[in-house]
């Protein structure tokens, strides 16, 4: 769990150092800008930007019941962040698995990607899709929200 917070904390520390340096050089406005920018970036790269993660086993069980996609991701991944931001509010309907917190999730991603932990990996109807187009994932979420498939 600690590993997921290292990149965001590093960004906050770097931003704080830059801000302090700017303030000491007589530019408090620039220092505040640096601090705000780095805190926002840290928030985007933290687990806070994603829906609450569930374990791989639970996500697979839920997906089998409701047909919604399972999204395997990890904090700090820019492609995962891109997918999350492009999905918007509809992204909350997917089942999110943080592979850094769930060894079974990491193993599922490695099995789907020839041994690599390439994320985001989205599983729909038992089929894995590595770094899919967010519009495609949004369409899959829309289909599952419309009701059961016939």
Image (cartoon, helix red, strand yellow):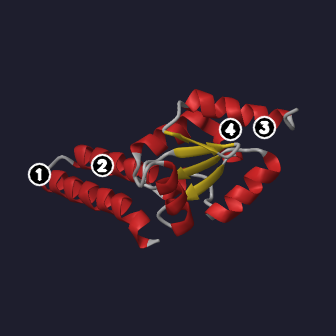
Question: Which mark is in front, 2 or 4?
Answer: 4
Give residue 78's position: percent from left, percent from top: 40, 43
Q: Which class describes the residues within 10 Å of circle 3: few (<14), some (14-19), or many (20+)?
A: some
Mark before the other along the chain sequence, 3 or 4: 4
Near-viewer residue (141 or 37): 141
Residue 6 coordinates in the image, percent (x, y): 35, 65
Q: Is mark 1 on a helix, strand or loop?
A: loop
* Distance between the alpha carbons at the discs numbered 1 and 4: 45 Å
Residue 25: image tag = 1
Alpha-carbon span between mark 2 and mark 4: 34 Å
Q: Residue at x 31, y 51 (%)?
A: 35
Nearer the N terminus, badge 3 or badge 1?
1
Residue 89, horizontal then vertical, whole percent:
66, 39
Q: Nearer the viewer, residue 149 or 143?
A: 149
Mark in the foreground, 1 or 4: 4
Disc number at residue 6? none
The residue to which callout 2 is attached is 32
Secondary structure type for disc 3 = helix
Give percent across and percent down for residue 117.
42, 54
**Residue 90: mark in rendering:** 4
Say what secondary structure mark 4 lies in.
helix
Dot 2 alpha-carbon crowd within 10 angstroms: few under 14, some 14 to 19, many 20 or more: some
The residue under label 3 is 144
- Give whichever of discs 2 and 1 has the lower sequence position: 1
Screen quadrant of the C terminus: top right
């Amino acid at each position: 769990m600690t590993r997921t917070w290292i990149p965001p904390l590093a960004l906050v520390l770097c931003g704080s150092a830059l801000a302090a340096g700017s303030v000491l050089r007589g530019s408090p406005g620039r220092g505040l800008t640096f601090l705000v920018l780095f805190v926002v970036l840290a928030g985007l790269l933290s687990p806070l930007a994603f829906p609450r993660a569930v374990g791989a086993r639970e996500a697979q069980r839920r997906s089998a019941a409701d047909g919604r996609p399972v999204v395997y991701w990890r904090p700090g991944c820019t492609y995962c962040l891109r997918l999350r931001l492009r999905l918007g509010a509809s992204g909350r309907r997917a089942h999110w698995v943080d592979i850094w917190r769930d060894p079974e999730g990491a193993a599922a991603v490695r099995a789907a990607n020839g041994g690599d932990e390439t994320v985001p990996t989205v599983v729909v109807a038992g089929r894995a899709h590595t770094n899919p187009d967010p519009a495609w994932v949004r369409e899959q979420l829309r289909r599952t929200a419309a009701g059961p498939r016939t």
